[in-house]
Image (tube, rainbow, N blue to C red):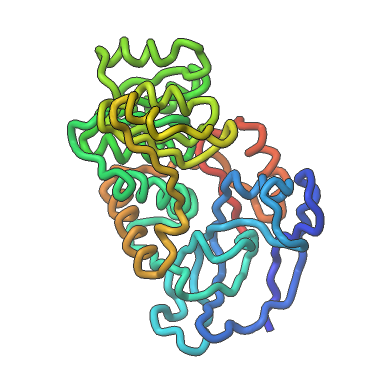
Amino acid sequence: MKSARKVVVAEFGEPEVMQLQTVDLAEPGAGEVRLRQTVVGFNYIDIYQRQGKYPLSLPTGLGHEAAGVVEAVGEGVTDFVPGDRVAYMNAGVGAYADYRNVPADRLVAIPEGVGDEEVAALLFKGITAQYLIRKTHVVKAGETVLVHAAAGGVGQILCQWAKGLGAFVIGTASTPEKCAIAKKAGADIAIDYSKEDWTDTLLKETGGKKADVVYDSVGKDTFYKSIDCTAQFGIVVVFGAASGPAPAVEPEYLNKKGCLYLTRPSVFPHNANPRAFRENAADLFSAVSSGVVKPSIGARFALNDVVEAHRTAMSRKTQGAVLIIP
């Protein structure tokens, strides 16, 4: 039996509730593989789940994505063999560990030329950007794209990818410093949406041109202004609620604003089966290999220092992904 170190949360609260424990890890069961995890990705949902804002059954692990190497396979596993480099982003919470058994159908192979750290920094966020920009609305050259929270993890990838597809990209962020990050990520113009008149500024800088698609992860604080910035027959894509859920809207309101479309998609249904997940990941890895999408790594922490990793992420002082190294 293999020993593994994993983070366990027995009660919700501050970062100190995370405890690093050594446990016995059983041999992989049917359909499972055992991974030696090389890099664990951090996402802000990890904080919400640790705090209890998105409550889990206690005790619980934390973390949704990691990259690593297959060490052993269970009965019936034919897609992977020991030594394969793989990653996952939806195998149940518990990625904060050095070894872990996961279902083989939740894994995707990491291609040559793409590093483990790149994958851990990008996979969850990149797969989110992938369905938004390739499925919810297929971005085309010449379109105008508005990305809220463009300095965030998903926002930067959306800016990079949309720009790579030939779109004119408008990014918004809450400070001048974050606007600079958005422009570095590919936004043609960046608007500070903490200012009351930011929509007027946007239309002035675009010569009155509105967006064909608006990607809104902020929610309540930006929703109605997102609609105001959407061109006729355009689409407003609400995929997050950083400021609170977007308010309800009457269908007739969308008609009056220009026959607009409105949708609220989610990453997990788009990657619910292994084939879809692997196809979407291949699309993302292709964008990474071609240099269109580039990871930004802000900080690395040892698994022993996971409390400090959460404190740093909560401070918002880092620019780029936070990685945990087992």
Q: Position of residue 157 (x, y in %)?
A: 39, 40
In this rendering, would 175 be left or right of 282?
right
Quarter of the figure with residue 199: top left
Q: How many numbered marks appear? A: 0
Quadrant containing the C terminus is bottom right
Q: Position of residue 168 (x, y in %)?
A: 25, 28
Residue 185 visible from this viewpoint: no
Residue 149 visible from this viewpoint: yes
Q: Position of residue 116 (x, y in %)?
A: 46, 57
Residue at 46%, 47% (x, y): give it: 125
Q: Considering only vertical position in the picture, is 118 above or below 85?
A: above
Q: Position of residue 314 (x, y in %)?
A: 66, 36
Q: Residue 246 versus residue 119: which sits nearer the camera?
A: 246
Residue extending furthest toward the bottom: 75
Quarter of the figure with residue 113: bottom left
Quarter of the figure with residue 147: top left
Q: Residue 251 versus residue 31: which sits nearer the camera?
A: 251
Residue at 25%, 32% (x, y): give it: 233
In this rendering, would 271 be left or right of 33?
left
Residue at 56%, 36% (x, y): give it: 245
Residue extending furthest toward the front: 252
In this rendering, would 10 be left or right of 185?
right
Quadrant containing the N terminus is bottom right
Residue at 53%, 60% (x, y): give it: 66
